[in-house]
Image (cartoon, rainbow, N blue to C red):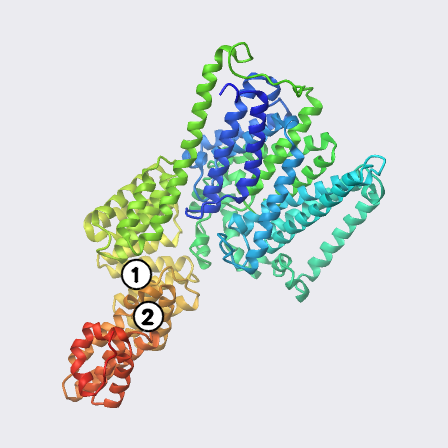
Amino acid sequence: MIEFMKRSHLLNVSKVLIFIILIGTPLFYLKQGVYPYIFSKTLFFQFVVEILLVVWLPLAIADARYRPQKTPLLIASTVFLLVLIATSLFGVDFHRSFWSTYERMLGVFTILHLLAFAFIISSLYKEIPWKKILYASLATAAFVSFLAILQKKIPNLLLVEPGAGGRPGSTFGNPTFLAGYLSFNILIGLYLFFDTLRALKLGPHIIADRNKRGILYVTWGSLAVFTLLCFTALFLSETRGDIIGLGAGFFVLLCIFALRPPEGSGLYSSRRFYAGLLLFLFLFGSLFWFTRQSSFWEEIPGLNRFRDVSFSILESDTSLLPRLIALKAAWSGFVERPILGWGLENFNVPYNKYYDPRALEVSYQETRFDKPHNFVLEDLVSGGVPLLLARIALLGIFVWQAFRVKNLFGCFAIAAAFGFMVRNLFIFDTLGPMLMLYLFFGFIDGEYKNRFTGVRYPEENDNRSYSGRGDAVGTFSPYLFILIGAGLVAAYMFNIPSMKASYYEFYGFKWFHNNPTRAIGYFDKALAEPSPYRWNFVRDFAAAVSEGYFYNLGKIKKEDAIRAIHEMETVARDHPEDAYNHYSLVDMYNQTSDIDPEKFLAAADREAQIALELSPRRQEIFFSMAKTKSLRGDYKGALKILKEALDLDPKVADAHFYYGLLLFADKDLAGGYSELKKAVELGKRWKNYYEPRAVADYFLDAGHEEEAIDLYKTAISMSPGDSKEILYHPLSQAEEKLNIGQRDDAISRKILGEAIKLFSIVLRVDPNNLIARVEIGVAYYFQKDYDSARKYLHEAAADPSLSSNALYVAAKPIFDQLGIEVMPQ
């Protein structure tokens, strides 16, 4: 251990860990886990940064030269961090502010890691091969880009899942998350390209060795290929915010070069050349904007998504309505708490409070915004004016330090900062671009410190041990070992249990449909892990168990359902300002109400009132309240509540859907059909196969067979393995009519005709339904239509499984009388 504590060893391990962070973080994800491209990726980053911190700590304790220096960027970062923590402490949910959620993973805790990463790099700047680090980052980005390009052609490539709407996300899973990461690496590629070009332009009197010049040419070509790969993948991601951000970065870079070109000769150092490129960029941008609706641009990925963008965007692109609603809610939240805000990662609270019912016109997913998609408003709503000023100061001082170092990389760092700020006017922060931004922070701060603070670094032969007697830490070395040990334990505890919980929950979801008992065992393992995100896992567990209990009565034990409810009640108490926790509980109480109707329905009423106070215009709460009323048999009261939901926004399909279901339940067949028909016309999105099946059952009862058939087919397409359950209603009705229609009279023949019609509907939906095929043949037999009976029974007899089916035993005399032989199994 003492040998390991030598400076050279600590520095070498630190270098390796920095490479692991920059190469591993973009590539790593645990597919067998929830939110694999966010949760597991961030846990990996945090874990390696914590190990790096443990390795760097002896260097910093023993030698002041390896400690962060009092640079303007360090001061600005400290102020930003203090403001962030203070506003989070005074926010509505500090736990969420500090740890974030497993969907986002950008709370105070992760930001601390990003800052630690940046200033460890700054502290070790002269000791690390920073250009090799940049090459490694670019090569990693090129590989990620290569996967994205392949993913466009092969959607299920390796372990990489298909991108959203055909837009590849590669190892980041989401095209937006990918694009932000690639933007920085494109600028890194251009910097290295320019740096290599500058070396070539210096002339043979500097690089006389042909082999060295050959290596530079190969490097130059490789950089061009890597950068082009990143550029191609970014445009394939079709992320408008990042394309605009990259364009802004190019614009700033050309402005800098037009005023202060790089050192060199020829076009490389010509102000006119860069001014010309700047003019070309401006003219190209103008030409594109005014011709963006031309069919020519439709074939160019990325640019084609600007086709419908206009200043009347509210009317032209309804898909942006949820974002505009989120921006408005963010502003309202800021106006209410302008000084300290609501706390980092707590935007969900003001969003719910100022929720606009029109969001549900798009989808349920678009009603749960936890980010306003604009860094200015996000900072204002999170920490008020102080947090926004602290962030602007941090980025401004970074730009100032980059300008002060007066080197080529500083110019690209300034361009990256401006590009980052522009893209974050449209997109929220994610780990990929944040990792790259803080890498730039570290390099610029390290260069600034090297130039302006007068820090002197050790000589190559200085290989002192930083433990043991007589050195810089001397007497305190045992405590140092204890501190390092504690750091390693903390690194494990902060990350690995959460990773394991994510893994277990993945298998909980995987097995839930086919083996609920096994699935609940996995959920229990997830909840047993000491994770700060346990409340996220509880919400998933409780929702899955209560929904499974409702739809698969008997498969979920009552004690498991009760336990799930109790766990969710704890989450609602611990995070009382989140409306979602309360209206989710309403649904859970409704779904499990048969366990204790009086107690659970009263609890549903209580939680619904809390939810309404937190989000008074959210339709989901009204839907759940109506469900509670209907479970009590109060259909009139339920209809009244649903009418209120309809009045909030008549264009919401689900409001008509639930209203129609209740009208059917209240025996108003015409009204129910009209409302459900309207829901379908408005583009009702089915949450599961139960919904189209329920509507199909009602449509069938109301005499709208063709529409019912289409809906049954939709339900089966959503869950092919559940066709028997989906077709239970028409099949059971048909069997009932078959049983009572076997007498030889006019009424029986009419009933048999109705049975045949229902069996035909089942077979149109599921031509392989053996039961329907046998029983329609039997129905024709009793109608004395022996030709039709023989046709259907012959088809059934060709199925080898018929001979072992109980139905065949009952129908065997008919098969024998018609002379039909059944194929043996």
Q: Can you give x and y, in whole percent of width and height, for residue 626 in the image? A: 30, 56
The residue closer to the viewer here, 650 or 142, is 142
The residue closer to the viewer here, 642 or 752, is 752
Say above or below: 604 vs 736: above
Callout 2 amino acid: Ala
Compute the Cα span from label 2 to label 1: 21 Å
The crowd level at tag 1 (other Cα within 10 Å; few <14, some 14-19, many 20+) is: many
Left or right side of 54 for 803: left
Image point (50%, 39%), residue name: 381
Q: Mark 2 or 1 closer to N-term?
A: 1
The residue closer to the viewer here, 770 or 436, is 770
Q: Nearer the viewer, mark 2 or mark 1?
A: 2
Residues at badges 2 and 1 in contact (C-beta under 8 Å)?
no
Q: Which dot marks residue 639?
A: 1
Choose top left, top right, bottom left or bottom right for residue 641. Answer: bottom left
Q: Which dot marks residue 609?
A: none
Callout 1 amino acid: Leu
> To which residue does mark 2 refer?
696
Which quadrant of the rendered structure holds the C terminus? Answer: bottom left
Is there any visible trace of residue 795 in the rendered image? Answer: yes
Image point (57%, 33%), residue name: 18
Is there any visible trace of residue 104 in the rendered image? Answer: no
The residue closer to the viewer here, 184 or 819, is 819
Q: Can you give x and y, in whole percent of width and height, for residue 371 in the image? A: 49, 45
Say above or below: 768 vs 580: below
Say above or below: 257 vs 544: above
Q: Can you give x and y, in whole percent of width and height, for residue 171 in the image? A: 53, 48
Choose top left, top right, bottom left or bottom right for residue 267. Answer: top right
Left or right side of 98 for 406: right
